[in-house]
Image (cartoon, rainbow, N blue to C red):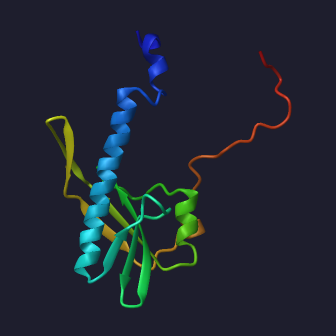
Amino acid sequence: MTGDRDHIRDTPRHPRFLQDAKLRRVIERHAVSRATRYLESLGYTVTDVGDRCSYDLHICRGSETLRVEVKGSTVDVDSVELTVNEVDNADGVSSILIVVDGISLSFEDGLHTPDGGRLRAWWSWRPAAEDLSATRYRYRLSGAPTYAE
């Protein structure tokens, strides 16, 4: 029976994949919303730039401007995944990392609703090389294959 459904696991059109993508987006937006409220409470003007930049929020207060990377999770975390662009964007500029973890989810009327979570902020954040570890590699297929059909 499992073999009959193996083909749907990696298919972007499969509802489970779409649901997971939607759920990740719900969690991310909740974390960004929490971060925005926190930063506004400190007197910052907050602009959500996540759809057009490789970081999530741009904040200003007077002449001070900062970039903010936000991560959200439904479990308590002691590490987060960063893209190459997220690491590069935090290098050499004033940045903050905000993590909202332990977010609870309820499901009603076909919608996931996030709530709460623990907000932690790392001001003057720069991803240090010793704190980064590779979790994926891109391998370039070079040379002739030993077998091909």
| Residue at image point 59% right, 46% down | 136
Viewed as shown, does residue 37 lie left or right of 49? left
Q: Is residue 145 above or below residue 20?
A: above
Q: Nearer the viewer, residue 127 or 20?
A: 20
Residue 42 position in % (x across, y down): 26, 82
Residue 119 position in % (x across, y down): 28, 66
Q: Is residue 73 visible?
A: no
What residue occupies the far front of the structure in this picture?
52
Q: Is residue 45 visible?
A: yes
Instruction: Indicate the quadrant containing the N terminus: top left, top right, bottom left or bottom right.
Output: top left
Residue 15 position in % (x across, y down): 35, 28
Q: Quadrant of residue 112?
A: top left
Q: Is residue 23 above or below residue 145?
A: below
Q: Nearer the viewer, residue 92 or 65?
A: 65
Instruction: Indicate the quadrant containing the C terminus: top left, top right, bottom left or bottom right.
Output: top right
Viewed as shown, does residue 81 lie left or right of 35? right
The number of numbered badges drawn on the structure is 0
Q: Is residue 145 above or below residue 110?
A: above
Viewed as shown, does residue 44 lie left or right of 149? left
What residue occupies the far bottom of the structure in this picture?
63
Viewed as shown, does residue 122 lie left or right of 138? left
Q: Quadrant of residue 143?
A: top right
What residue occupies the far left of the structure in this picture?
108
| Residue at image point 40% right, 26% down | 14
Residue 78 position in % (x across, y down): 39, 59
Q: Nearer the viewer, residue 127 or 109?
A: 109
| Residue at image point 38% right, 77% down | 59
Q: Is residue 18 above or below residue 114?
A: above
